[in-house]
Image (cartoon, rainbow, N blue to C red):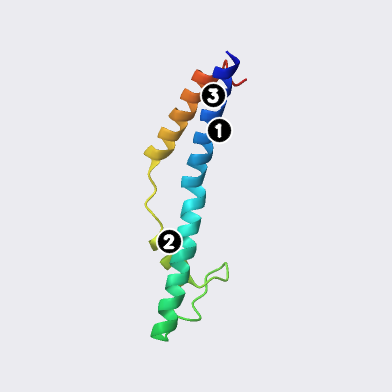
Amino acid sequence: IEKLRTELISVFNIDTFRRLALECLLPTILKKFDRKEEVEINRLTDRKKFDTPGTENENGDESGTSLAAAAKLDEYEQFDDYLEMVIELGYVTIFASAYP
């Protein structure tokens, strides 16, 4: 029984860290590479960003920059969040006796 408990705990923890890496770390790393590529392209073309200078919003940010950043974001899908919650509920239900 103790070996089974250890295996269930390791499966749960490994899957939790895998999902964390896929949802948080991987997009952050990809975003850094995209920024480096964008800076390199801007440097090679020797031009500033396509935003109009001097158009600041109430936060002090340039409005073109925030719009361009929002346009680059992936579309939000609620199904992925619901699926993750159902998987977590399944883990809690299955592993409740082994992982108190």
Is any part of residue 11 visible from this angle?
yes
Image coordinates for residue 100, horizontal then vertical, percent: 62, 20
Image: 21 above or below 54 = above
Q: Residue at x 48, y 40 (%)?
A: 19
Distance from the alpha carbon under mark 2 to that under mark 1: 33 Å
Residue farthest to the bottom, as pictured: 46
Question: Relative to residue 60, is residue 22 drawn left or right?
Answer: left
Tag 2 residue: 70
Q: Nearer the viewer, residue 62 or 8?
A: 8
Q: Residues within 10 Å of mark 3 (few under 14, many from 20)?
A: few
Image coordinates for residue 60, horizontal then vertical, percent: 57, 71
Distance from the alpha carbon under mark 3 to that under mark 2: 42 Å
Q: Residue 7 got which mark?
A: 3
Q: Earlier in the sequence, mark 1 or mark 3?
A: 3
Image: 12 above or below 100 = below
Image coordinates for residue 31, horizontal then vertical, percent: 47, 61
Residue farthest to the top, as pictured: 1
Query: In which image quadrant can residue 96 be found?
Result: top right
Q: Residue 13 got which mark?
A: 1
Image coordinates for residue 45, horizontal then vertical, percent: 38, 84
Q: Tell me if label 3 and label 2 are in contact, CB under 8 Å.
A: no
Q: Residue 59 got which mark?
A: none
Distance from the alpha carbon under mark 1 to that under mark 3: 10 Å
Is any part of residue 51 visible from this angle?
no
